[in-house]
Image (cartoon, rainbow, N blue to C red):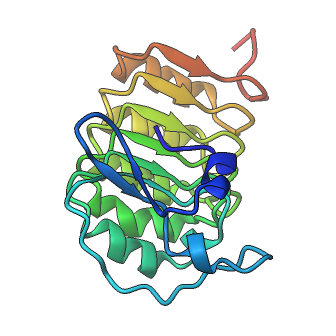
């Protein structure tokens, strides 16, 4: 699991151990160069990280520059965990990185206000069939159709958090139909899903 924002800020080292197998995760070049206001240094070459399993760009503006992140993800063949919470990620970003994430198992994309149309989540559904954990809390694009697409494309899903979204009953019904391994579902604060429905 990726570290929290507080632990990211405490560590001066952009590399941290990500498990007993010695896998490493890269938390970005901004560790040493990030200005006070959180604007990142995007002068990034395309490094190769053959053992990188977790990439955490949460609470930064890095995902606004999809080309930079895509260039990194393309060289991470075993990436399983991506955290873009409150990072400026939008539909274009998710659609751009999705084809390079065939091994993705965990996606944290909460508070992504620019993910609006559901196109990005649909791309994740189309390319990330092994996805098991999805958190899209307070993300506008997590609506009935996009969550239904995720349900159909990601049958291994066992953790789904769609709290504070516009997900519909149809979306939740699709999850119930296509995700038999689901063990956790959070639909709190979803006005379209009521006791009557």
Q: Is residue 95 visible to us here?
A: yes
Residue at coordinates 35% horizontally, 59% vertically from top-left? 98
Q: Quadrant of the C terminus?
A: top right
Q: Is residue 197 left or right of residue 175?
A: right
Position in image of residue 103 (x %, y %): 24, 46
In the image, farthest residue toward the front: 12
Foreground residue among 171 and 126: 126
Position in image of residue 78 (x %, y %): 22, 51
In the image, farthest residue toward the bottom: 43
Position in image of residue 31 (x %, y %): 57, 69
Q: In this view, does 62 lie to the left or right of 125?
A: right
Q: Is residue 93 left or right of residue 188?
A: left
Position in image of residue 143 (x %, y %): 61, 42
Reply above or below: 152 against 77: above
Foreground residue among 13 and 192: 13
Residue at coordinates 26% horizontally, 62% vertically from top-left? 76
- Residue 80, image quadrant: top left
Q: In this view, does 30 lie to the left or right of 132?
A: right
Q: Is residue 139 visible to us here?
A: no
Residue at coordinates 38% horizontally, 51% vertically from top-left? 124
Reply above or below: 135 against 94: above
């Amino acid at each position: 699991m990726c570290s929290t924002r507080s632990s990211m800020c405490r560590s001066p080292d952009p590399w941290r151990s990500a498990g007993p197998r010695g896998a490493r995760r890269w938390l970005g070049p901004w560790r040493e160069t990030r200005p006070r206001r959180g604007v990142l240094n995007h002068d990034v070459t395309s490094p190769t990280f053959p053992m990188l399993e977790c990439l955490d760009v949460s609470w930064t503006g890095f995902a606004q520059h999809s080309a930079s992140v895509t260039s990194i993800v393309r060289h991470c063949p075993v990436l399983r965990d991506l955290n873009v919470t409150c990072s400026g990620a939008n539909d274009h970003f998710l659609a751009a990185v999705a084809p390079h994430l065939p091994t993705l198992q965990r996606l944290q994309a909460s508070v992504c206000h620019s993910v609006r149309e559901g196109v990005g989540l649909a791309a994740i559904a189309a390319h990330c069939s092994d996805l098991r954990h999805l958190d899209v809390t307070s993300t506008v694009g997590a609506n009935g159709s996009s969550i239904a697409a995720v349900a159909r494309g990601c049958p291994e899903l066992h953790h789904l958090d769609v709290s504070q979204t516009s997900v519909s009953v149809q979306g939740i019904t699709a999850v119930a139909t296509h995700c038999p391994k689901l063990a956790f579902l959070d639909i709190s604060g979803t006005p379209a899903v009521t006791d009557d429905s």
